[in-house]
């Protein structure tokens, strides 16, 4: 078995370039429901064209439908899936639980790939989706080689691993930083990249770091690990970059193609394209120090040499070649960005390129500086790897018979009643060569064409020859298309479970638990609770679980699904209720959307579903395997001091668990206690989510919630410290 090389395609032309450069498959998005809303993306017409080309090349096309779906979008999302299914797309990458189940249950001839947004981190997560009958798991970027090996040795589920490109500092699918501050939800493809901004670190209220790019990850580069991943028989190796240009994608595909085909292959091309400082990431069990570059967040480039001022010119001693139109970063008192318009040799003659030494005219004023190339304009690539097509023509009465062959496959068509006897000039072979060479939009090039000897007795218009060529290509494309059947849609059957409205609690430390345990309310803590990054089997029966692996291990228990499942629509809710007794709704829902979701569920099932809403808590904006506290040298003090990061407007507390997983919290607490009366029309369970609160604060908040649940009017909201979150705001 060989590893699939999976390339990004932010546009049609980039997709073609990647296929011809050696990618085995592409992943791409359309204008809706893909996690890169700001990429150019594909039209349906372009999608059909590239599926046709991929089929002929023996390659595959996967479409991303990996955003969370609102109730009002469900029908459009299903119709889009039906459309791409009919087009012949080989697989769809999904996140929303409603779409996952739709593809698996009703579109059986299209593979369902579980997106990295779902957070598959371990064998148990994979086992859950194996049981669900998905066809591929895209692992979280935080998964290391040891766990990948464990998965491959114990599961038949194909897995996909990221090998190159930008990294999210948070576990994908569990970042709410962007949506809370800007309403641009990263879970819906509109991330505002708050991680690329500057922050300060505070310890017990004291500033302990200057402004720096504390959350800005380096770029993943797994080139040196490819042989290890091949040995583990990883099914698909994925390059990130649907927002990148054609040169970037072609460079990566070409480089990794060579590496997969020749384990000894080496290259410096990866340094010549846009990239932040490189890291091997968590694949290689990297330390915190190697994941983020806190000094800069942008393109690093390839080191070029040293620049020294000489009168009105700059002398440049090169360690790598330079060409006209290359873009440079010059590091002196600040960073200067220059496009190279003129290059001079030692005799001040203009030249187009140089390897060792040259002069530049630059509109800057520095004495000495280091220089990096951040964009190479003239990288050389091999010609597109197209297929030779042989064409043979014959004449039968006034019809033309066309036989074509490639790769030991044969195709034929007949163009009827197209020939007329020539009155003056008849046809010749060159007439057909000229028109049949116009195969640029196809995966072919014309290798040879044979025409009958009596062709000069006949006349055929150029437009008709072109039609014959197009009809032949379409016949080839159609031969690869399978007849696909869409099964009848239905939601799962559910049994009504009646529960009174109730109040439950989650705690993060024993002091909080001890302060609240005697109030008599259900508390999820330690033995009955798995957080996002902890997958384990628990002994108790009534559990709060935060990941799919814990559902798999505890499927015989009474489960409440936590907020990490991102339930945003009533179809997802229905499917989740087949594996649990209660579902915590997404914190990105507004009150209006909660009402719509529950109403739609009720109209279908005629009973109120068991749902939980978090009505108090410092919202988790990011969940990190990387620790910014350790990065700045304070490892070991996270449980002894209070840390938070701060930008120009707000502060964000840091909370680290015993497994060194760091949560970035919103400094303002989401407080919906006063809304409980209205929300009780739709929600059956309300939860207080305690994180950084003291014991006394926990008791005060709980008592306010109890009073509110008992119908008392309590002034529970402080506008200086509290927020309503998304209650009156809808995410994009």
Image (cartoon, rainbow, N blue to C red):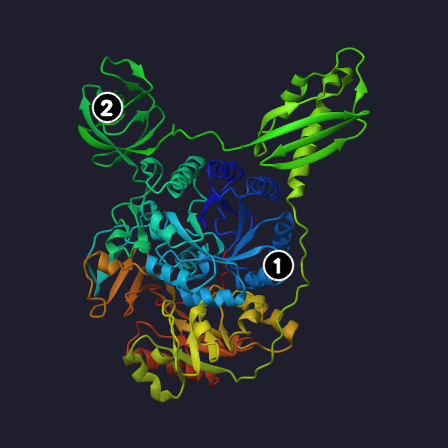
Residue appearing at x 44%, y 71% in the figure: 562
Q: Earlier in the sequence, mark 1 or mark 2?
A: 1
Viewed as shown, does residue 498 lie left or right of 475?
Answer: left
Crowding near the residue tagged with mark 1, few <14, some 14–19, many ≥20 C-alpha atoms within 10 Å: some
- On the image, the x and y values in percent for residue 444 come to 58, 32
Q: Is residue 193 visible?
A: no
- On the image, the x and y values in percent for residue 631 come to 23, 56
Please identify the quarter of the rendering in which residue 108 is found. bottom right
Tell me the mark number nearer the camera, choosing from 1 and 2: 1
Q: Is residue 727 shown above or below 230?
A: below
Given residues 367 and 610, the one toward you in this image is: 610
Crowding near the residue tagged with mark 2, few <14, some 14–19, many ≥20 C-alpha atoms within 10 Å: few
- On the image, the x and y values in percent for residue 394 come to 73, 25
Q: Give the residue at mark 1.
A: 108
Given residues 539 and 241, the one toward you in this image is: 539
Please identify the quarter of the rendering in which residue 615 is found. bottom left
Q: Is residue 214 shown above or below 439?
A: below
Viewed as shown, does residue 551 lie left or right of 89?
Answer: left
Residue appearing at x 21%, y 52% in the figure: 210
Given residues 560 and 184, the one toward you in this image is: 560
CA distance separating discs 1 and 2: 59 Å
How many discs appear?
2
Q: Is residue 642 visible?
A: yes
Residue appearing at x 54%, y 46% in the figure: 60
Q: Is residue 499 shown above or below 151?
A: below
Viewed as shown, does residue 385 lie left or right of 571?
Answer: left
The residue tagged with tag 1: helix, strand or loop?
A: loop
Specify the label residue 356 is tagged with. 2
- On the image, the x and y values in percent for residue 396 come to 79, 26
Specify the label residue 99 is tagged with. none
């Amino acid at each position: 078995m060989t590893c699939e090389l999976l390339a990004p395609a932010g546009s049609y032309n980039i997709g073609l370039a990647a296929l011809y450069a050696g990618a085995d498959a592409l992943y791409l998005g359309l204008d809706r429901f893909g996690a890169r809303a700001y990429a150019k993306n594909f039209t349906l017409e372009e999608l059909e064209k590239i599926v046709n080309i991929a089929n002929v090349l023996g390659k595959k096309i996967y479409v991303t439908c990996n955003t969370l779906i609102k109730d009002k979008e469900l029908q459009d999302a299903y119709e889009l899936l039906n459309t791409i299914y009919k087009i012949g797309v080989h697989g769809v990458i999904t996140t929303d639980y409603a779409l996952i189940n739709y593809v698996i249950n009703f579109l059986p001839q299209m593979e369902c790939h579980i997106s990295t947004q779902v957070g598959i981190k371990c064998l148990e997560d994979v086992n859950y989706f194996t049981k669900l009958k998905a066809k591929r798991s895209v692992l979280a970027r935080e998964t290391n080689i040891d766990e990948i090996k464990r998965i491959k040795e114990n599961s038949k589920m194909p897995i996909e691993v990221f090998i190159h490109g930008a990294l999210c500092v948070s576990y994908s699918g569990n970042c709410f930083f962007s949506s809370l501050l800007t309403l641009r939800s990263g879970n819906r493809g509109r991330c505002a990249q708050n991680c690329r901004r500057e922050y300060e670190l505070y310890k017990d209220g004291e500033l302990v770091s200057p402004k720096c790019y504390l959350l800005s990850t380096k770029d993943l580069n797994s080139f040196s690990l490819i042989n290890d991943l091949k040995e583990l028989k990883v099914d698909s190796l994925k390059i990130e970059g649907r927002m990148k240009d054609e040169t970037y994608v072609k460079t990566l595909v070409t480089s990794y193609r060579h590496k997969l085909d020749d384990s000894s292959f080496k290259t410096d091309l990866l340094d010549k394209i846009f990239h932040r400082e490189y890291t091997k990431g968590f694949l290689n069990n990297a330390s915190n120090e190697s994941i983020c570059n806190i000094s800069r967040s942008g393109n690093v480039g390839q080191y070029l040499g040293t620049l020294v001022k000489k009168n009105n010119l700059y002398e440049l001693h090169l360690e790598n070649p330079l060409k006209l139109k290359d873009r440079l970063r010059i590091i002196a008192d600040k960073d200067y960005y220059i496009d190279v318009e003129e290059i001079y040799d030692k005799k001040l003659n203009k030249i187009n390129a140089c390897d060792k030494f040259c002069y530049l005219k630059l509109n800057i004023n520095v004495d000495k500086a280091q220089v990096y190339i951040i964009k190479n304009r003239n990288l050389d690539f091999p010609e597109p790897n197209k297929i030779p097509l042989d064409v043979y023509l014959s004449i039968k009465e006034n019809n033309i018979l066309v036989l074509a062959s490639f790769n030991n496959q044969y195709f034929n068509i007949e163009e009827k009643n197209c020939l007329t006897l020539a009155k003056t000039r008849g046809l010749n072979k060159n007439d057909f060569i000229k028109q049949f060479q116009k195969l640029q939009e196809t995966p072919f090039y014309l290798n040879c064409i044979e025409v009958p000897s009596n062709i000069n007795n006949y006349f055929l218009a150029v437009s008709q020859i072109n039609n014959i060529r197009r009809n032949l290509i379409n016949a080839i494309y159609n031969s690869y298309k399978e007849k696909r059947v869409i099964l009848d849609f239905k939601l799962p059957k559910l049994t009504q479970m009646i529960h009174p409205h109730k109040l439950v609690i989650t705690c993060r430390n024993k002091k909080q638990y001890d302060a609240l345990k005697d109030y008599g309310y259900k508390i999820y803590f330690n033995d009955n609770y798995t957080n996002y990054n902890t997958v384990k089997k628990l002994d108790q029966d009534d559990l709060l679980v935060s990941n799919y692996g814990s559902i798999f291990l505890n499927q015989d228990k009474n489960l409440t699904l936590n907020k990490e499942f991102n339930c945003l629509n009533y179809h997802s809710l229905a499917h989740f209720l087949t594996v649990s007794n209660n579902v915590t709704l997404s914190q990105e829902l507004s009150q209006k959307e909660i009402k719509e979701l529950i109403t739609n569920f009720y109209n279908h099932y005629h009973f109120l579903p068991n749902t939980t809403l978090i009505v108090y808590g410092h919202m988790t904006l990011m969940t990190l395997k990387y620790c910014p506290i350790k990065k700045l040298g304070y490892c070991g003090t996270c449980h002894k001091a209070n840390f938070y990061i701060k930008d120009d407007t707000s502060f964000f507390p840091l909370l680290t668990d015993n497994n060194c997983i760091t949560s970035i919290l919103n400094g303002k607490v989401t407080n919906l206690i006063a809304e409980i009366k209205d929300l009780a029309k739709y929600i059956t369970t309300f939860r207080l989510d305690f994180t950084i609160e003291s014991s006394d604060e926990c008791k005060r908040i709980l008592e306010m919630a109890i009073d509110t649940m008992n119908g008392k009017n309590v002034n529970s909201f402080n506008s200086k410290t509290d927020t309503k979150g998304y209650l009156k705001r809808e995410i994009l």
